[in-house]
Each structure stands twice: as C-alpha cells, then as structure tokens.
Amino acid sequence: MDMKKNKDTMDLLSEISGMAGEEPELLSARTDEAYVRLSEAGFERAALALAEKKFSLIGLFCAEAFEKESGFTLFYAFKKAGRAHVLVLVREAGRAAGREGKAAHGAVSSVAEIFPSASWFEREVRDGFGLEFSGAFDTRRLFLHECYPEGFHPLQKTFKNGPISLRKPEAGKNPEEYRFRETKGEGVYQVAVGPVHAGIIEPGHFRFNVIGEPIFSLEIRLFYKHRGIEKLAEGKSPLECVPLAEAVSGDESAANAVGFCTAVERASGIAVPERAECLRAVLLELERVYSLLGDLAGMAVDVGFSLVASPFFILREEVFRQNEKLTGSRFLRGIMVPGGLKKDISGPALEELPPFLAKFSRTFESAFERAMSSSSLIDRFATTGVVKKELVAPLNLTGPLAKASGCPADTRLDRPYGAYRRLSPEPSVKKGGDVLSRFEVKADEIRASVKLIKRLLEEMPSGPVFAENGPAAGEEARSDVRPGYSGPSGYSIALVESPRGQNLHWVYLKNGRIDRYKVRTASFCNWQAIEHAVLGNIVPDFPVINKSLNMSYAGTDL
C-alpha cells in the first residue's frame, strides 16, 4: 500500500492520538485517505471525540479475510465537512463462521448512539456477515426480509451464489412479522403506505402515526428487491464490475461508474489521462442536469402543476438525446472503464453541445420563472418538509438536501477528483431546509452544471483517453482476465458527488480481482432524513416532500 505521509496525514494522526489516548497504528495512507488501527478502548475514546468534533460517519463496512487468512475486519470511515481527508478506523471483529453459515463468533460494541448514521450500517453488516453489535438499539433485519432463512449471511465467503430455500411459516403459526415502532395514545392512528405503489415507483413501506391531521412520526422500510450486487462483484475483474456499478441506480450510472473506476485506479496506481478526466466530468454534469430536471418536474406534478412541469420534462428528454449522441447511451452507460474511457468522444458531437446549452439555458430560465411566479406553488413549497441543519452531520446528509439546509458540503469542492481539481462548480446554499429551498438549490445546481460543462469544453485538452497502465478496454486485449494473470492488489475509497450527494465506493483488489466491493449511495443516508422532514406536516404533503428529497430505492437496496 501507498504510505504518503503528507502534512495533513501527520496532523490527522496526531489528532487521533490525542483523541484515543494512545499511539495509532497506521496501516496505509494516501494524500487524502488514512487507515488506522486502535485498541478497543482507544477506538471507543476516539469515536466519542470524533462525534464531539462534528465528524460524520460516512461509511461502515466489513471484509472477510482482509490482509490475512481468516476473520472479519470492520472499517469505520469518518469525514468532516470542508476537509478532504477520509479517516478509516480499522477494527477486528471476531472469527469467521463455519461452513454451516451460522453467525460469527463474538460481538463488537455498537456506535449507533454516538453516530445515528451507524444504525443502518450496523444492521446491514449484521445481515451480510452475521456480526453482532452489542448495545445496538435496533437489531431488526435490514435487507434480509422475513422470507430469508435463519443463519443466512450472503456476504460471507462460504456462501456461493445460487438458489436458496426460503423460510416458510410453521404449521398453525404466522410468519415472523417485522415490528414497526408503535406510538400509542388517545387520537393516534396509523396510515400505512406501500410497499406497492401506483405507477412505476419502486417498493417501499411508509408507516405514519398521525394525530388528527399532522404527522406525529414516520418509519420507513425499504430493501424489498435486494439484488446482491456486492456479492456478484466477488472474484470478477474490474472491467467486469463496471456494468454492476452502472446498475446500482439508473439515474446515477455515470457517477457510480466513475466512483468504482476511481477506487480501482487509486488502489492500482493508475493515472487517468487529462482528456479522459475532462470528458468524464462533462458526462457527470450532464447526468446531474437531467436528474435534477426530473426532480423539479416531479415536485411540480406532486402539487398539481403539470403546466409548470412540462418544460422541465421536455428539457430532460433533450439532454437524454445529447447523451446518446455523445456516448451511444441515453443513460451514459458503457463508456467508463478503469483507466479512462472505452473510446474518445468525437469532435462533432462535442461541438454540438455549446449551442444546445445556450438554447437550453434560455428555455430553462423561462420555465423556472414561470414556476416561481406561481403563488400557489410557492405556498405549497414554502415551510413544507423542513430538514434542520442540526441533522446533517449526525445522519451524514449530503447533496442538494444538505445544501438546502445551510450546509455547503460538496465532494467536488472539498475532496476534488478528476477534472474538478482544476475546475469547480459554483456552490449554492439555502437556509430554509424546506421544499422551496430544495427546489431553488436544484435549479442553481443545473445552472452551475451548464456553466461548468461550457468551461470544460472550452479547455478540453487533446490526447489519449485511456491510461497506458490501465486494464485493457477492448475485448480482444483483456489480459486482466487470462487464467494465471496476477494483477495489482490494494484497497482504496473513492467519493464522488452524484446528483443526490456523496456516493462512496471502496474496492479491495487481490491479484487483479475484486475481493470486496462496497458501494454506499447518498440515498442510503439521506432516506433517514424523511422521517424528520414530515413531522408536523400532513399526509397529503408527503408526496412532494418525498419528491423534493428524491432518494433512490434501487441505490439503497443493492
């Protein structure tokens, strides 16, 4: 592993030493990423201190047989807004389970009461690996619903993909039921929405507790269509895994492909050519534009203003057509590879973008002005679905959601990657935290993306789009999948800014193959904000609150 101990890394190690009351063991380091091991007591002291210093727990994931023959290792990734460094505390967590697939031996203490974002992370690790977290306030299953058998932990190495025997209720007994939180009292009643919804919305269950008309509490339950993406990645080459990353969430295909490729490139020491970085950024910003256009249109539809929504939908379709001209895919799939791009994007296709964007901007501003001139629309948006700024760091809320609540964090700015190291977008921050603030922030993000694309096109360098030391992109030259090939080994985190916020990709390579691939989209954390945003609102306002946050079901349920 790289051990680049720059000043920021040394300062971070000194800071951790003071928090833990002991000298940390540095396992590996890059310019903006450090892996540190502490004793159990040191870990607990450090966790408390990190919470006090407003660090967010941006990821908690597990690997089996990490850098050794057996056992589980937990990785706690921390980041503070405005700082580039990601601190990963590495924690050993017991021995691996036997071939029967039963739960792992031993347990580690939960940190969910210190870092609320840890609750879903811990439940996810428990389902996937069978590890127990002592002191956890929520030990219910997360992505393994009732039908999965006991002792089934699909991310253990002993589990091989294939048909499984689903759990059936015993004769005369009801199946085990997921216990939702209950609020009891005079006048309290429940409203259950989902998991099946009208139209093409993906499944998700929303359990409201209501007093009169105002919502008193909400609990959400997702993970109805778990796809096993992380398990599918095991043993594959990086090239084979790019389509898996693109399938995490359809409208974040480019962001997740770049996130995965960047993690592989960092772990393998691959330097991406400058032209490829600039073209990637153009595609990422186009993805941001069409995704956020869908949000603006959807928010207007959910309060009955289809006339306001129509121009946003039309512009979105026009961006899709530009995407297809540039890459052959409306959703920008099939062009990203570790090392750069599969192919260069032709001059004529790029030359069409500036005039298209000029026309786009005029139409967009007209559509936005029409929306903001509607007093009825403003009345429905303003003060609805407020997410308080105090929730941002504890829940690791990111993207337009956080920016609309007064937090300017943006991965492109505070941990720049690729072309964003040279060119950065104009930030937009609002303080209201309501649906109107999110509408305005997303409109500003579209404007900033259009400006950034124009600058990228003006400064587009010439040259190759694939690294000389990257894995081959052509089918005829895929040396990394030959029998007996011994590729790079290593591990690294990549953070990318998707249209919804910060996406995390962690890749662990062994001899050129994926041993563990962990992906966490912004939606995984942002979903938990909706339980707070709806409080005090009425149930009919839930659709527009939900749409203004616009989390991905698929991007959460991997």
Image: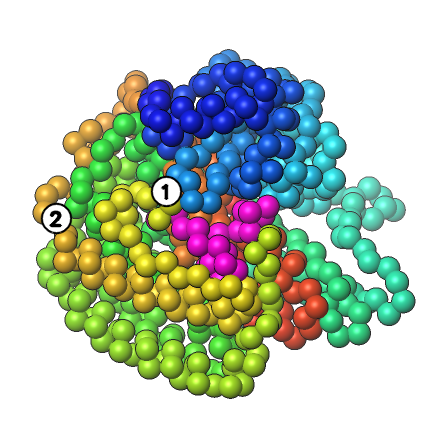
Q: Is residue 222 left or right of residue 293?
A: right
Residue type, label 1: Arg
- Colour theme: rainbow
Q: Residues within 10 Å of mark 1 (few under 14, many from 20)?
A: many
Q: Position of residue 118 (x, y in %)?
A: 61, 39
- In percent of width and height, residue 426 lies at 32, 59
Q: Which residue is mark 2?
A: 461
Percent x, y of residue 56 = 54, 41
User: Which mark is drawn over residue 415?
Assistant: 1
Which quadrant holds residue 311?
Answer: bottom left
Image mark for residue 324:
none
Identity of the residue drawn at 78% across and 45% down: 176
Instruction: Say if the magenta span includes residue 411.
Output: yes
Q: Is residue 334 above or below residue 45?
A: below
Q: Position of residue 303 (x, y in %)?
A: 55, 79
Which mark lies nearer to you, 2 or 1? Answer: 1
Q: Residues within 10 Å of mark 2 (few under 14, many from 20)?
A: some
Residue occupying image coordinates x 40% and y 24%: 10
Q: Quadrant of the N terminus?
A: top left
Amino acid of disc 2: Pro
Residue span colored magenta: 392-412
